[in-house]
Image (cartoon, rainbow, N blue to C red):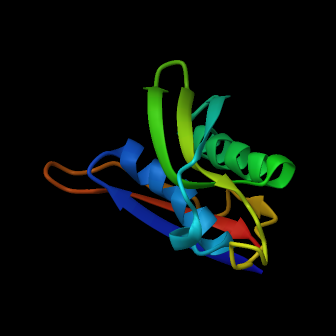
Amino acid sequence: ADVQFHTWGDTLGEAIEQQVVCMFSYITDLGTVDEVEESSVEVSAHDMQSLLYAFMDEFLYQFCVDGFVARRVTITSFDRTAWTMTAKGFGEKFQPRAKHPQGTEIKAITYSAMQILEPEEGGKADVYVIVDI
């Protein structure tokens, strides 16, 4: 099955940060996640869609390998010429049953129907990503 995440922000960076937060809110209740650890992500790609994909996929990878759940994400650099992005995630290690309720497992990020809409003057940026659950 698939689920579509729709996020928005005053800037494209904010909308992208919220995609990762949205993904983790599907995995667990973020109200139970404390910001006691920090995780760094650095990705590169060849265009905006592949950069968004790589960004989300790296956070999903960190969850699968290390159990890290980010309650908040901050992009620290976003180069749209070189197609690179670095960010920090703030959260903690996932503790199912002990602290964090189990939500839905996310198997993969997809390119299917991915949309990245730049903000119009005074508007919001919108980002749509479908994930495989």
Q: Position of residue 84 (x, y in %)?
A: 56, 25
* Labels in figure, total: 0
Q: In which quadrant of the rendered view does residue 125 lie?
A: bottom left
If the image is split into quadrants, where does the C terminus sit? Answer: bottom right
Apparent side of residue 1 relative to residue 27 in the rendered image (left or right): right
Picture quadrant where residue 9 is located: bottom left
Q: In this picture, is 21 found above or below 3?
A: above
Q: Residue sitting at 45 percent across and 29 percent down?
A: 76
Where is residue 87 shown, x and y percent of the image? Answer: 53, 34
Where residue 11 appears, as percent x and y from the top left, is 31, 45
Outermost residue, top direction?
82
**Quadrant location of the N terminus?**
bottom right
Q: Nearer the viewer, residue 71 or 12?
A: 71
Q: Is residue 98 above or below residue 20?
A: below
Which of 59/128 is in front?
59
Which residue is depicted at the point 56% across and 43% down? 89
Q: Residue at x 69, y 79 (%)?
A: 101
Residue at the far right in the pictured view: 65
Q: Looking at the image, is 20 positioned above or below residue 96?
A: above
Residue 19's x, y, as percent?
52, 57
Left or right of residue 30, residue 78 in this image: left
Q: Residue at x 20, y 56 (%)?
A: 123
Say left or right for 132 vs 65. left
